[in-house]
Image: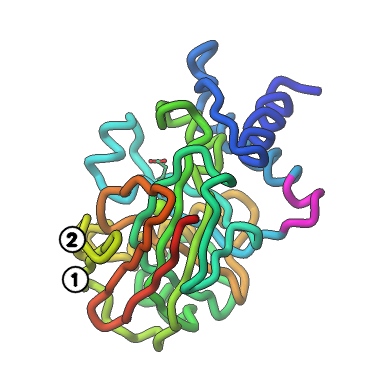
């Protein structure tokens, strides 16, 4: 087993069993490139258990977050079928280390998309747009990680829920978004805080997935990144994200 395979086994086991682990870079530095290699190896372990890739998610979708983490690009991770949550359903806290929720915009891919394309070309390759939420759950204790660590940990991806699909020409450049926990607003934001326009995150998703040799395919989902700070989840929470024009999406925590 190589060092990268050993790290993939550790992070995969932590995700599978909801165990917190120390950040890898505490012992020796992990480059972002090696982080992506660990992520790919950990995905192979999931797929070997019968899980399957259903799309990708974007992270660090604000310039301020990239600077804070010492990066000049977005990061991305894989979405798999076992991460899918039922709209209006519930998730068990037992399956997570310390989950947080983020309101996001989701794109449904219509045909294969790859390379450096414009936002207009990207939108022409989309079949639908929906409101969504992502549950992130860093496997590292106290959400403490550097860029290589978080990439190795599949960019904290742990769950996602998607609302009704809307036509691809729906304007989502500056939609008001409210994230309610137990009926009270916890975060208020705008889709414009996703890189100024979520379609820029879609363009980056197309570029990064293709660079990694897995161009986006028909039916793939892309989560464009959070429109607000993430909110910690607790047992008993009812979580609802309301999006101007796109409607709402909700789930509970048991
Ligand atoms: O925005 C995100 O999906 C999070 C990316 C990873 C960083 C984190 O876990 O906070
Ligand atoms: Mg996210």
Highlighted range, magenta: 46-51
Local secondary structure at mark 2: strand
Which residue is at the front of the view, 254 or 107?
254
Query: Given contact means CB atoms under 8 Å apart, are the residues at marks 1 and 2 in contact?
Result: yes
Residue 163 horizontal/vertical position (percent): 43, 77
Query: How many neighbours does mark 2 have within 10 angstroms: few (below 14), some (14-19), or many (20 or more)?
Result: some
Q: Is residue 48 magenta?
A: yes
Residue 59 vs 205, above or below: the answer is above
Q: Mark 1 or 2, which is nearer the eye? A: 2
Tag 2 residue: 188
| Image-based side of 114 in relation to 230, left or right | right
Numbered badge on residue 176: 1
**What's the residue at 45%, 72% (across, down)?**
107
**What's the residue at 41%, 78% (across, down)?**
129
Local secondary structure at mark 1: strand
| Image-based side of 147 in relation to 210, left or right | left
Residue 53 horizontal/vertical position (percent): 66, 59
The answer to which image quadrant residue 209 occupies is: bottom right
**What's the residue at 28%, 40% (across, down)?**
65
Which residue is at the front of the view, 72 or 65?
65
Which residue is at the front of the view, 128 or 203?
128
Residue 189 vs 138, above or below: the answer is below
| Image-based side of 158 in relation to 225, left or right | right
């Amino acid at each position: 087993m190589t060092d990268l395979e050993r790290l993939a086994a550790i992070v995969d086991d932590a995700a599978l069993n909801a165990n917190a682990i120390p950040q890898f870079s505490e012992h020796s530095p992990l480059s972002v490139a090696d982080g992506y290699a660990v992520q790919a190896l950990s995905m192979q372990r999931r797929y070997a258990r019968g899980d399957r890739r259903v799309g990708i998610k974007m992270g660090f979708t604000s310039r301020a977050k990239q600077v804070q983490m010492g990066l000049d690009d977005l990061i991305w991770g894989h979405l798999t079928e076992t991460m899918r949550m039922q709209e209006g359903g519930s998730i068990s806290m037992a399956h997570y280390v310390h989950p947080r929720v983020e309101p996001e915009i989701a794109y449904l891919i219509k045909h294969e998309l790859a390379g450096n394309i414009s936002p207009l070309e990207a939108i022409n390759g989309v079949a639908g747009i929906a409101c969504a939420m992502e549950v992130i759950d860093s496997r590292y204790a106290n959400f403490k990680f550097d860029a290589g660590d978080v990439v190795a940990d599949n960019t904290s991806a742990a769950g996602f829920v998607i609302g009704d699909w809307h036509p691809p020409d729906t304007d989502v450049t500056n939609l008001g978004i409210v994230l309610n926990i137990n009926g009270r607003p916890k975060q208020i934001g705008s889709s414009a805080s996703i890189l100024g326009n979520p379609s820029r995150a879609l363009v980056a998703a197309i570029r990064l997935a293709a660079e990694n040799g897995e161009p986006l395919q028909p039916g793939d989902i892309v989560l464009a990144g959070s429109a607000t700070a993430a909110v910690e989840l607790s047992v008993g929470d009812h979580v609802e994200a309301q999006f101007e024009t796109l409607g709402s999406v909700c789930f509970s925590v048991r």
